[in-house]
Amino acid sequence: MFRVDGDLAPFVQVGYLDKNAQKHTGLMILDSCSNKSILSREIAESITPVCKEENKTTDIITSANTVITLSHTEFCFVMGGKQFREEFCVSNGEFPCEKIGDLSIIGLLGNEFMQRHGLTIDYREYSFHTSIIEQDEVNISDCDYFFPMEKGLKDFGIPIVLLSHKQEAILAMADTGATHNMIASHTINDRGMEYRLLEEKDFIMGIDGKVEVDEAIVKFNLASLTEDGGVEIPRQEQFKVSPYYLIAPKEDRCDENGNQLPPVEAIIGSPFMAKEGWVLDFGKQIIYKRKSSKILFLDIDGVLNSKWWYTQMDRNTPKDKYGFAFDPRAVANLKRIVEETGADIVLSSSWKCMGLSQVQEMWSKRNLPGKIIGITPSSGNDETLLDADIDSIDRFHIRGEEIKKWLKQHGKHVSHYVIIDDMDNMLSEHQSHFIQTNPEEGITENDAEKAITILNKLF
C-alpha cells in the first residue's frame, strides 16, 4: 500500500525483462473495478510487439463513461517470487501517477487476473496474497462485515456492495483503485439523504470533459450479511458528489434472468476499505472483515491510583469494600480512551489477584469506564503469591511475559493493543505499544492522546 498525494491506494511491485534482457522493476495498481489488466504503452513497446494477435482488441468503458478500444500484448513478469505470463490490454494514455519514489507505475492488475489466480487484497494486514482460507473457515458469525462478490462480478464485472438509506438499496462499487468515495447527486437528492457540503471542491472527468464537483459528508448505512439475514451498519463518510451515475442503467444491461440491472450509484474507495479493515478475496469471491478487538492492558496503582490523589484524600473521599475511589482525573482520561477507540480492558495489575469476577463487580459498582474482558495470567505460582505481602506482590509479576501469554492465548483477533503501566518490565516487542505513566500523576491527558493514537493507528 502507498499514499499517493495523501490518499491511500494499493500497488504491487513486479520485475520484468526488456527486449535486451535488461532487468527492470515497476509498480502495478491493484484495480478491482477493471476487468482487464492494462499495461503502459511505453512498457509494452519495450518488451514485445504491441499486439499478440494482429487484430485482437478490447473495448474499455472509462471513468468518463466513454468507450475506448485497446490492443493486446503478452507480458511476462515476476511478482512475489512467482512467474506470470499474462495477456494485457495496452494503454492509450498515461497512468494517474507516473512514479512513486524511484519506481514507475507501469500498469494495473484487473479483477479477472485476481480471480484466476485466487488473489486477496487484505486491508487489515496491508498485503496482497493468495487466498489463505478454506471456504468453511470464514463463517458469517465470525465477521463484523460479510458480503459476497459473486453477483456483482457476474452482473457488472466488478465487486458490488450495498449501501442503503431508509431501507432503499444503493449499489456501490468496491473500487480498490479509487483514492476517494463518490456518489451520484441524483442519489442524494432523490433519496433525501442527510449530508453536509464542505468548502473544498474537486474535479472529475465526465462525458463533457473536466467537471467541478462538490465534496460532502454523507450519512448512509452499510449492508452486511448475518446469520439471521442482514444488518445495516450506520456510517458517515466524505464523498465527491458526481452529476453522473457511476454505471448508468441501460435497457440491454440485464441479469441472468433478463431483469434490467439498476444503476451503480456510488464508489467506495481504498481509504474507506482500509479504515474498515476489509479483506477482498477474489478466489473465494467474498468481502469480509473478521471480528477484531482493540485491547487496553491496564495497571491500577500508579495509573488510576496516583500519589497526588493519595495526598488529596480525606474522610469525605468515597470509599467502599475495595478501598478508596480512584483518581477522578485518571478515570476521566481512561474514559476518553475507551470512548474514542472502543477498546476492551484486560487487567494486568496485581489487583487481578481478586479474580476476574470480583474485578468486574468492582468496575460495575464504581461505574468505571470500559469493559473488563479478562486478566493476564500470573507469572508467579499460586503458593508464592498467596504467601506474598500485598504491598510487594508486583515483584513476582513480569508484566511483559504475562501480556505475551495472554496475547498468545487470546490474541488471534486482536488488531491493536496498548499497555498503560507505571512499571517498565515489558518485553522489547511491546515497546511501540507501551505508555509508562508517572505514578505521581497517573494517566494524564497526554498519555490518553498517545493511547488513542496507538489504538486507532491505520498502519
Image (tube, helix red, strand yellow):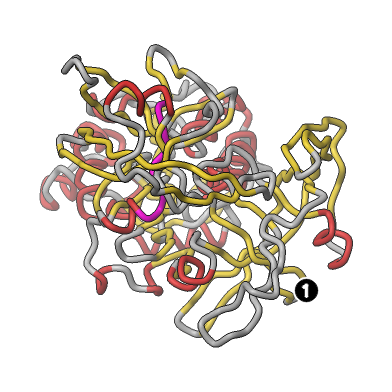
Is 225 drawn above or below residue 50 in the view shown? below
The percent position of residue 365, horizontal first and vertical second, equals 56, 61
Residue at screen point 47% across, 21% down = 438
Q: How many marks?
A: 1
Q: Closest to the observer: 34 or 151? A: 34
Position of 62 compared to 393: left or right?
A: right
Residue at screen point 28% across, 57% down = 116
Position of 130 compared to 100: left or right?
A: left
- Which residue is under mark 1? 166
Q: Closest to the observer: 149 or 226? A: 149
Residue at screen point 69% across, 66% down = 263
Q: Closest to the observer: 202 or 136? A: 202
Is 352 drawn above or below residue 256 in the view shown? above
Q: Decide if residue 74 is in sight here.
A: yes
What residue span does the magenta drawing correspond to?
Answer: 106-112
The percent position of residue 107, horizontal first and vertical second, equals 41, 33
Q: Secondary structure at mark 1?
A: loop
Give the amino acid type for the residue marked by disc 1 in the picture. Answer: Lys
Residue at screen point 33% across, 51% down = 113
Position of 63 compared to 92: left or right?
A: right
